[in-house]
Each structure stands twice: as structure tokens, then as C-alpha cells.
Amino acid sequence: MTSLTRWEPFEGMVTLRDAMNQLLADSFVWPRASTFLGAMLDLYETDNAYTVELAAPGLKPDQFEITLEHNVLTIRGQVKAELPEGARYHIQERRFGEFRRSITLPSAVDAEKIQANLKDGILTIHMPKVESARTRRIEIKAA
């Protein structure tokens, strides 16, 4: 005996939302090494200065280039893979290559007084604000 199956004309269709979700899920791309590679940073402000702290494990001062142009701080660096001759990777999770981070500062800084230090894998860049950009308390005088 044969069984009868009812034909459902819309059975194979998916909603536009489901199709878009699948499209986005299938096209996920990991960030490039230049944005992911050891270039995670913090920027914080005090009344007198801005400070950037960038995680740079294993890097040396000569592996960085730091520039300030039109109130944009740019930090460039390179991490090189040092694999012994004849060796090959079985697992490679660390990222190698060049990285670059650019940050537009909220106000002007004194470029002549910027200091950069590298200690314990943290690059610290201290940038004093120009006098006109510093926070000032204004006293109100009684009449």
C-alpha cells in the first residue's frame, strides 16, 4: 500500500530574517592581525594629561614607531615569529606581523613633552595637555 503525502507549497521557504541570520553567521570574519595583534590599549585622562597604555608583551622599544600628527596619535609595531630552523607549528595561536593603532585625542597636547616608556610588556605614553586645554576652576566673586 502506498502512503499519500500532502504537498505544502511553502514548506521549504525560510523567512528573510532567518536567511539574513544564516548569511551573517556563514560570513563571520576574524579580525586582521593588525587590529588584533597585541595592540589592545587603554586611554585615560587626568586634569593635566592623557595617558595611553598598550599591551605589548615581548616587544622591545626599537620595535615601535610612535607619531603625533594633527592631534592623532599613531602607534606602529611589529611582532616577528621566531621559529627555529626546521621546526613547524602544530598549534599557532599567537599573532605575528605588523600592527597599527591610531587614536584621535579629545584635545590638544604638548608634543614637545610627550614621554613613552616600556616596562613589563606595557607601553605607556604620557601626553601633557596644552595650557588652554586644561580644566580650570573659576571662582565666583561676591559683589
Image (cartoon, helix red, strand yellow):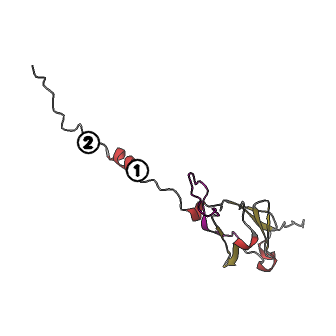
Q: Quadrant of the C terminus?
A: bottom right
Residue 28 x, y percent position in the rendering:
45, 53
Which one is in front, 75 or 60?
60
What residue is drawn where x is 62% and y is 61%? 37
The residues colored magenta run 82-106
Residue wearing tag 1: 26
Q: Residue 13 carries which label?
A: 2
What residue is drawn where x is 79% and y is 74%? 114
Looking at the image, is mark 2 or mark 1 earlier in the sequence? 2
Which one is in front, 107 or 64?
64
What residue is drawn where x is 47% and y is 56%? 29
**Residue 105 part of the magenta segment:** yes
61 to the left or right of 25: right
Which one is in front, 131 or 93?
93
How crowded pointer 2 is (Cα within 10 Å; few <14, some 14-19, many 20+) is rated as few
| Magenta stretch: dominant secondary structure | loop
